[in-house]
Amino acid sequence: SKQAGRNRFAFFEAKMGEELRMRQSAEDELRAAIENDELQLLYQPILSAQDGKIVCVEALARWQHRAYGLLSADSFIPLAEERGLIVALGEWALRRACAEAKLWPDVKVAINVSPIQFRQKDFVATVNRILTESGTDAQRVELELTEGVVIADADLAEHAMVDLRALGVRMVLDDFGTGYSSLIYLRRFAFDKIKIDRSFMESMEFSGESAIIIRSIVDLGRSLGLTVTAEGVETEEQARFLRTLGCDELQGYLFGRPVTATEIEQRLAEQRAE
Ligand code: C2E
Ligand code: CA
Ligand code: CA
Ligand code: CA
């Protein structure tokens, strides 16, 4: 079945990621890949739940590895974080996404930021510099952070968030609902948007509990004036349920897998022509 195939692929990928991490040379290979621009970004559409139009695309890193083929982020981001390469990788991703987003001026671009990258003292300055150098309007950029970001040094994180929002960048709390302190963080930090973690979608059809949690998150987000996005939407039933709840944005394989900048540009051109 399709699901079994996907599980097998996920298993294969996890195994490759594991193998890669064990390799002595992995760090050198990844460093070289970053320096030689051998990584790439794919973009996944995020749609308005209201009218089904693409409003944003999320940049997701990929590595075309000589021995392992195309590796998805899950198989090398942890390696980059362990071996001190995530700051360079993160800067590369910011620069690349800002450059490529010029192809689609009417849509926002979301970029993932590792907690380690966010904690760098010069992070805000780096973002500002890349925006200026690439001529990107800050209003078009969303930075996706996970809770890990704020746990380590809440004061530092709070200041960085304020400064980034002052630049005009939108701040997104990714994987919402997986950490146990999410509610406290929502109150303390000035997020613009929350993304309901994919794990709730996966189990949505099978247990009433996930559906209840999703409903609560949407209600909470809306009452705090936040945009609420659901990720990992794979079926029409899930999409219908999320629309009924009043979820603002939808993302997942149902609406499109991550694709190259050129392919996203094409899809947006078709959307404009409709
Ligand atoms: P994430 O930010 O939660 O990204 C969502 C992940 O779910 C992506 O995996 C995406 O391809 C996958 N996905 C999207 N829709 C569906 C769906 O309908 N069903 C299923 N089963 N999966 C879906 P990916 O690309 O492997 O990225 C994994 C994680 O790696 C990301 O999780 C993010 O935390 C991290 N990541 C990716 N790119 C970057 C980057 O440039 N910098 C940093 N720091 N982290 C990155
Ligand atoms: Ca994300
Ligand atoms: Ca996520
Ligand atoms: Ca995730």
Image (spheres, helix red, strand yellow):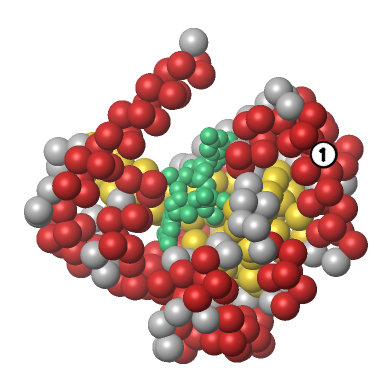
Q: Residue at x 87, y 42 (%)?
A: 245
Count the labels in the image: 1
Left or right of 254 in this view: 209: right
Name which residue type carries label 1.
Ile
Asked whether mark 1 and ligand 3 are closer than 8 Å, the reply comes as no
As displayed, is residue 180 above or below residue 153? above
Q: Quadrant of the C terminus?
A: top right
Q: Residues within 10 Å of mark 1 (few under 14, many from 20)?
A: few
Foreground pick, 165 / 158: 158
Q: Is residue 174 visible?
A: yes
Q: Is residue 264 visible?
A: no
Q: Position of residue 198 (x, y in %)?
A: 61, 42
Foreground pick, 20 / 98: 20
The residue sitting at the left extreme is 24
Q: Quadrant of residue 201?
A: top right
Assign a secondary structure to mark 1.
helix
The residue sitting at the top extreme is 1
Q: Position of residue 38 (x, y in %)?
A: 23, 55
As displayed, is residue 135 above or below residue 56? below
Left or right of 70 in this view: 201: right
As displayed, is residue 36 above or below residue 19? below
Q: Residue at x 68, y 62 (%)?
A: 182
Q: Quadrant of residue 39?
A: bottom left
Q: Position of residue 193 (x, y in %)?
A: 71, 63
Q: Residue at x 77, y 73 (%)?
A: 187
Q: Position of residue 249 (x, y in %)?
A: 74, 49
Q: Quadrant of residue 50?
A: top right
Left or right of 24 in this view: 16: right
Q: Residue at x 9, y 54 (%)?
A: 25
Q: Which residue is mark 1?
A: 212
